Amino acid sequence: MDFLLQLLFSPLPTSAIVSLFALAAGVVFYLHTRPSPCPALRPPPPVSDRAEHLGSGLLHKGLKPNSDTFIGIFAQNRPEWIIGEQACYTYSMVAVPLYDTLGPEALVFIIDRAEISTVLCDNEKKAETLLQSREEGQTPVLKTIVIMDPFPSELALGKSNHQEPIPPKPEDLSIVCFTSGTTGNPKGAMLTHENVVSDVAGVIKSIEVVMYGAGAKVGFFQGDIRLLPDDMKVLQPTIFPAVPRLLNRVYDKVQNSAQTSFKKWLLNFAVERKFAEVKQGIVRKNSIWDKLIFHKIQVQHRSHRDTYREQEVGVSGGQVRVMVTAAAPISPSVLNFLRASLGCQIFEAYGQTECTAACTFTMPGDATSGTQCGIKGKNVFKGYLKDPKTTAEAMDKDGWLHTGRHRGNGFRGSTLHRRRLRNVYGRSGTVAQVFVHGDSLQVKEVYLHSEQFSIENGLLTPTLKAKRAELKNLFQPQIDKLYANL
């Protein structure tokens, strides 16, 4: 012990002290200058800087900073999509989203209709699609294709040729969103910056901005829809926006699993008791019905494939506290069932491209469904690009946007009856999809078709809605034969 104390507290020779200081200085220098072992952990430049650099690069290539310049964005959801969009807004240019699921004919139509000279792509496959149509003389207006991975040359070009932002005016075009075209060619809904800001200040501010302020995070999927269940398991969302098509799968799967009369009665009784609580404002996951029946729907199970696995029904991780259904009408029976069984707040939203996406949103504790929608305000679009006739059909002279829809119940008149028929037939476990056509409101005959409607065969839109015109043309021989037999 004496030896140890003497070693620790004895004065060091000058050479040793100098050596220690030199070693310390070397360590400090190394820590400050060494390369990062993981460059991905380095914080990227601010989005605003990257948007300015990209926008400056596009201007240096000859584009004009005004609302007559349309920039196509041909990519899946990813950070560079947002950067490209913000680059357009920073210099008063107009963003035009493009989708490969629209099909090559629709792409050609949009590029020509909007006179898009520059397109930002996320991969070479999409660029090849554009180049092929260009080489075939279908899109002569297209001059430039920029690959997003990850804008290296354009960012560098813009950084070295930086231009000050040129902000747009409220009435300037912000984005032209082409609808998926269920009844013909896509229609380009023109949205101004005033439209977008109005929507943000109204609906979106109360949701996204509040969530971001509380530290919420957003997850981008990997880009492959088949890997979405894996993305969901990793993310374990607490707030989960969903489309009715996905929620219908949950409903159908649970209903079809109750194969005996007793199981059907027990399921319906449990839903009835839980929904009675929901109507009283009680939302919970710890009732006797949750423990006996609904637990399998709420959390992930990895047992036999016939159980309600979340990678099949889409409710992942058991952490969901708020769910929003939007993008298409949802049946009241399905919505009531989900509100009872999932044990979380489920809000029904309605909107459309023509009113800058969001329009109506149910209030907490509102367990009703089905409200007629007519829209007027700063969020209503400017009109359809180069299509005054269709614009006049959508808006009246007083500025009202006539949607022709009921929140949750679809269209009025005969279309409403067709939707009800689809919902009835669609409940069958042996029926995958339904297309109802008729000049009267009665269904007299049925034709069975073996191939499912899909985006790939051109019968569904990118938002998975039926393309009625294409379906009618496809089945016209069968329709004529069915009417002939009446």
Image (tube, rainbow, N blue to C red):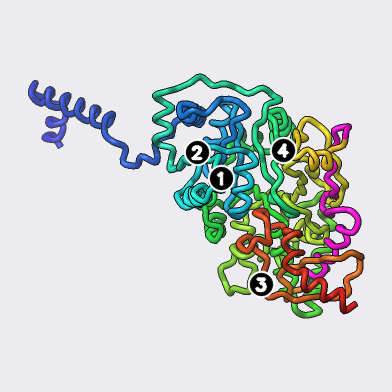
| Residue that label 1 marks | 139
Which label was assigned to residue 143? 2
Of callouts 4 and 2, the N-terminal one: 2
**Amino acid under label 4?**
Lys
Left of 56 or right of it: where is 5? left
Up the image or down, 100 lies above or below 154; here it is: below
Q: Residue furthest front?
A: 137
Position of residue 170 measured from the top left corner of the image (x, y, whole percent): 69, 24
Secondary structure of residue under mark 2: loop
Q: Distance between the residues labelled 1 and 3?
A: 33 Å
Question: At x 79% / y 43%, what residue is drawn?
Answer: 390
Is any part of residue 209 visible from this angle? yes
**Amino acid under label 1?**
Thr
Position of residue 431 measured from the top left corner of the image (x, y, whole percent): 74, 73
Which tag is nearer the camera, tag 3 or tag 4? Answer: 4
Position of residue 222 measured from the top left corner of the image (x, y, whole percent): 50, 52
Between 270 and 379, the one lying in front of the other is 379
Up the image or down, 345 lies above or below 28; here it is: below
**Amino acid under label 3?**
Glu
Secondary structure of residue under mark 3: loop
Between 213 and 203, the one lying in front of the other is 203
- Quadrant hosting residue 86: top right
| Residue that label 3 marks | 451
Which tag is nearer the camera, tag 3 or tag 2? Answer: 2
| Residue that label 4 marks | 386
Q: How far apart are marks 4 and 2 (CA)?
A: 22 Å
Question: At x 78% / y 30%, what residue is drawn?
Answer: 378
